[in-house]
Image: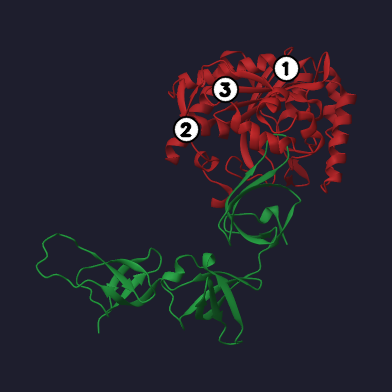
Chain colours: A green, B red
Amino acid sequence: MYSVADLKKGLKLTLDGDPYIVVAFDFVKPGKGQALYRTKMRNMINGTLLDRTYRSGETFEPASLEDRQMEYLYKEGTHYTFMDQQTYEQVVMEEEAMGDAKNYLLENCKVDVLLFGEKAIGVTLPNFVNLRVTQTDPWAKGDTSGNDSKPATLETGYTLRVPPFIEEGELVTIDTRNGEYSTRVKG
Amino acid sequence: MRKRNLQLRANIIREIRNFFHVQGFLEVETPLRIPANAPEEHIEPCRAGGWYLQTSPEIAMKRLLCCGYDKIFQISKCWRDGERGSRHVPEFTMLEWYRGNSDYHRLMQDCEELLSFLADTTGCGNNITYQGRPLNLRHKAERISVKEAFKSFASMEMSKAIRTGCFDQLLVTEIEPALPQDKPVMLTEYPAEMAALARLKPGDASVAERFELYAGGLELANGFSELNDPAEQKKRFDEANLKRLQNGFPPLPLPEPFLNDLSAMPPAAGIALGIDRLVMLLADAATIDEVVAFTPEEL
């Protein structure tokens, strides 16, 4: 159990059954009045922001969160299924909780799944992943239009801009933090 | 940045002294470590060698009034345990001044004159910007009673807010952000339940002659016409201790010599102004961290 004295930026707690992370916090107190703890919290499942003010003596349930390495198995409709390779336990994550991760995820890929109790609420990818280009226009040699990038579609279906010299079938490295092309994988 | 703020801080303190010396105030120093503060429901004193560090110099300064001192001021450190936020450090600097044979209206005038004097003498000018919003320090302060403020800006009537224990929360979350920002504001006539050491208004015992000075949204000072009835004062101390017990806090010792002296106090008025906040205002600092030499976390 947390008390108001534990409140600080980054603290994760359970509120109305959902996990929240404190994103802003301040102690305020009118001169002779009671101490108040103002917080702004983000719902870790749907991202909504919440303003709450607490008084001394109030307590909070910590959020029971766990990062567990799991293998991505398959997608069905809007559900993504992951499996713990040690226990063979499977969890299903909604597409909206996947965020951008769905752009970079291939079957049998190992990722960290964030669990809130039994529920999968997020996935952490490595900062860089290698993916194959399945479609892009050939580089027109002598192109003087000055374009220094062109669209390409990856094996996950994700489309992004790549340098003109990238060809279909090549492996490229993507920065999962901003979704941009990083480099070509040689060989 | 911080060095510039500390230079301004030194200028402000020097000019505050000038302001009071010129008007014939006597600067006093009273002991910082004392056997008892005024017990308050929501203020935690720090213990020091079996006694306490002062949460405010008011007890000692009022005893000086009882001894016949008339116009006195003091700049001293105060300690309030556990108070740490963007506008709070547990050890802070307080300016207090007292006027014998006077009341809180005169203190409000002092506040206006002091702000305007500091604007001139520290080179900040009358028109400053605090956190992106213009503020005229020479402007006559707008006086709004707490009751009116609740009516205008809060989602609940004052009496209901007191009954349901939401008074402070609504004050901080709804009223303070809605107060005029372009001039100083005096929030006046606090409800009698929050009178602390203030005299009740003659003719209307539901409110106390107490006010808070705000500028740029910062709560700068708390002043009042002083209660000088020892029996009533003792009753309020006992009530504060009772509420502390109910809230799970230990009751605090009473300042007995102060209670013994109090009947000798003339009608008087006194005020406490946070110097750190005043520096924040004039330095346009978002947090108190920017105007102190070291925060507790840096020690």
Q: Which residue position holds label 1? A: B69
Residue B55: x, y in percent? 71, 37
Going by the numbered disc 1, the residue's amino acid type is Tyr
Apparent side of residue B242 relative to residue A127 in the rendered image (left or right): right
- Labels 2 and 3 in the same subunit: yes
Q: Which residue position holds label 2? A: B283
Q: Is residue A35 above or below residue A156?
A: above
Q: Front-most of B142 and B194?
A: B142
Q: Quadrant location of residue B68?
A: top right
Q: Front-most of B273 and B168?
A: B168
Mark 2 residue crowding within 10 angstroms, few (<14) / some (14–19) / many (20+): many
Q: Which residue position holds label 3? A: B184
- Labels 1 and 2 in the same subunit: yes
Quarter of the figure that contains the N terminus of chain B? top left
Given the image, what chain letter belongs to the residue carrying mark 2? B
The residue depicted at 64 percent of the width and 54 percent of the height is A7
Mark 1 or 2, closer to the camera: 2
Q: Is residue A48 visible?
A: yes
